[in-house]
């Protein structure tokens, strides 16, 4: 078996493609940590108390644009080891998508924060169990909506209101995508509970690759049906 590559094909073999993927993931992870560093540092100083939930949410605000930039860079990653510019793609995605990402991320963050505060104080407030269960379902649906919205706003140039509508539409229109994202979110939550809260941040690029793979049908339908 020969490992030679044809002239002009340097860096496109299986080993080179694997190395390119690993390099891209590491660079994107570095960019994400750098972009979210102020919030993450502040978050680590907070005590694990329900009263700090609004502050924790404020610390997570930078994560929205950073996650969007990660999806942008990962979607445009190259397989050729000789043609890698993930850092350039990350910061370009950050500049292009920061406003759109915040437009969908902040409402979701506000909603899940309110749900978390309500659940945390359910005993003192006398909230019935069925209402708590309903709030949890609403937060879960909102999170699934966010996964669609972040992918759409990261890869396409739509108004925030159109992103919101498309994200909700594709929750029903592409059930296989929704189910795949349910599995992804449950797996991430499970690993986080068993290991540490730092897992989502450390594995964000890997989770981003999986999310883009899950959403490939939705991405193609958005491209063919809703763009010129």
Image (cartoon, helix red, strand yellow):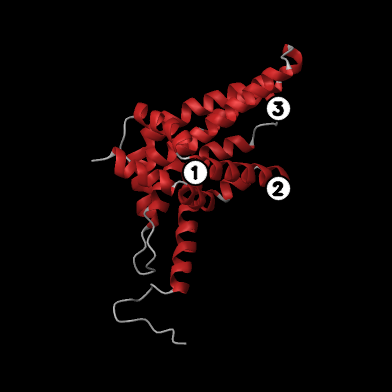
Residue 177, which numbered label? 1
Neighbor class of circle 1 (other Cα within 10 Å; few <14, some 14-19, many 20+) is many
Sequence-wise, the earlier of marks 2 and 3 is 3
Numbered-mark total: 3
Q: Position of residue 219 (x, y in %)?
A: 38, 45
Cα–Cα gap, marks 1 and 3: 35 Å
Q: Position of residue 146 (x, y in %)?
A: 48, 34
Sequence-wise, the earlier of marks 2 and 1 is 1
Residue 195, which numbered label? 2
| Residue that appears at 73% across and 19% down | 129
Q: Which residue is mark 3?
A: 49
Q: Position of residue 203 (x, y in %)?
A: 57, 51
Visible residue check, residue 62: no
Q: Nearer the viewer, mark 2 or mark 1?
A: 1
Residue 202 versus residue 9: which sits nearer the camera?
9
| Residue that appears at 38% across and 32% down | 163
Sequence-wise, the earlier of marks 1 and 3 is 3
Q: Is residue 218 above or below residue 10?
A: above
| Quarter in which the C terminus is drawn | top left
Query: Element type at marker 2?
Result: loop
Furthest toward the top, the residue is 126
Residue 79 versus residue 130: which sits nearer the camera?
130
Visible residue check, residue 88: yes
Query: Element type at marker 3?
Result: loop
Q: Nearer the viewer, mark 1 or mark 3?
A: 1
Cα–Cα gap, marks 2 and 1: 27 Å
Neighbor class of circle 3 (other Cα within 10 Å; few <14, some 14-19, many 20+) is few
């Amino acid at each position: 078996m020969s490992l030679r590559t044809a002239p002009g094909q340097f860096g496109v073999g299986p080993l080179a493609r694997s190395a390119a993927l690993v390099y891209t993931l590491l660079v994107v992870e570095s960019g994400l940590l750098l972009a979210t560093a102020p919030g993450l540092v502040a978050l680590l100083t907070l005590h694990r108390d329900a009263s700090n939930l609004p502050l924790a949410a404020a610390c997570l605000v930078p994560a929205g644009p950073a996650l969007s930039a990660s999806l942008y860079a990962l979607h445009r990653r190259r397989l050729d080891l000789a043609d890698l510019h993930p850092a350039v793609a990350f910061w370009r995605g950050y500049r292009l998508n920061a406003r759109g990402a915040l437009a969908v991320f902040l409402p979701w963050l506000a909603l899940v924060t309110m749900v978390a505060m309500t659940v945390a104080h359910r005993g003192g407030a006398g909230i019935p169990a069925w209402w708590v269960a309903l709030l949890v379902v609403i937060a879960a649906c909102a999170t699934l909506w966010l996964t669609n919205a972040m992918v759409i706003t990261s890869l396409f140039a739509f108004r925030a209101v159109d992103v919101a509508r498309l994200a909700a539409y594709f929750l029903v229109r592409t059930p296989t995508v929704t189910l795949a994202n349910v599995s992804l979110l449950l797996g991430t939550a499970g690993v986080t509970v068993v290991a540490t809260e730092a897992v989502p941040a450390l594995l964000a690029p890997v989770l981003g690759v999986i999310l883009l793979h899950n959403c490939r049908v939705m991405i193609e339908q958005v491209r063919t049906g809703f763009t010129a």
